[in-house]
Amino acid sequence: MTDLLTRLTEMLDDLDADVDETIDLADEVAASGDAGLLPRLQAELDRALTERNAYARELLGGVLAVIGGPEALPALIRASAVDLGDDQDGLAAEIVDLVQADPKTAGSLLRPLAEDDDLAVANRAEWALRFLP
C-alpha cells in the first residue's frame, strides 16, 4: 500500500496530474484501511500545510479521516486551522462526520483543543464541538 501512497503524493505534487485519477487513488488508499500508513499520512499532511497546498490538504485529510477515524480529529483540526484561502468544504465535512460518528471520543479529543494556545486551533475545535449530538 505504501506504493499507492507514494503515487498519490507524487500526483498531488504534479500540477498536470489528472484530478479524477488523483481522487480515485486517494479513495483507494483510504479504502485500504491500512493504519500503518497513518504516520506517513500525517507527515504528508504537514508537508501540504507547509507548502500551502490546499488541494493536498483536502485529499490527504480525507484519507487520514477514513483510516484514522475519530482519533484523527486533532490532526484534522490543526490542519483546518491553517488558513490556505480555500473553503475547506471537504475537510469540514470529514470533521463533522467523525464528530457525529463517535461523539464520546470526539468530545474527549476536541475539548482540550478548544483550550489550545493557538486561537485558530481553539476556534476550529469549538466549531467542531457544535456538531456533537
Image: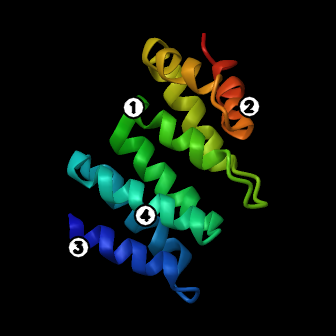
Q: Say what amino acid the circle numbered 3 marks.
A: Asp
Q: Which residue is mark 4?
A: 44
Marker disc for residue 3: 3
Marker disc for residue 71: 1
In primary-sequence order, the first of circles 1 and 4 is 4
Q: Say what amino acid the circle numbered 4 marks.
A: Glu
Q: Say what amino acid the circle numbered 2 marks.
A: Asn
- Secondary structure beneath disc 2? helix
The Cα–Cα distance between marks 3 and 2, rounded to whole angstroms, is 36 Å
Q: Which residue is mark 2?
A: 123
- Residue at image position (40%, 60%) is 43
Q: Say what amino acid the circle numbered 1 marks.
A: Glu
- Secondary structure beneath disc 1? helix
In primary-sequence order, the first of circles 2 and 4 is 4
The Cα–Cα distance between marks 2 and 4, rounded to whole angstroms, is 24 Å
From the top left corner, tell me how far across and down residue 91 is, in percent: 60, 46
In primary-sequence order, the first of circles 1 and 2 is 1
- Secondary structure beneath disc 4? helix
The Cα–Cα distance between marks 1 and 4, rounded to whole angstroms, is 17 Å
The Cα–Cα distance between marks 1 and 3, rounded to whole angstroms, is 24 Å
In primary-sequence order, the first of circles 1 and 3 is 3
From the top left corner, tell me how far across and down residue 92 is, in percent: 65, 41
Q: Nearer the viewer, mark 1 or mark 2?
A: 2
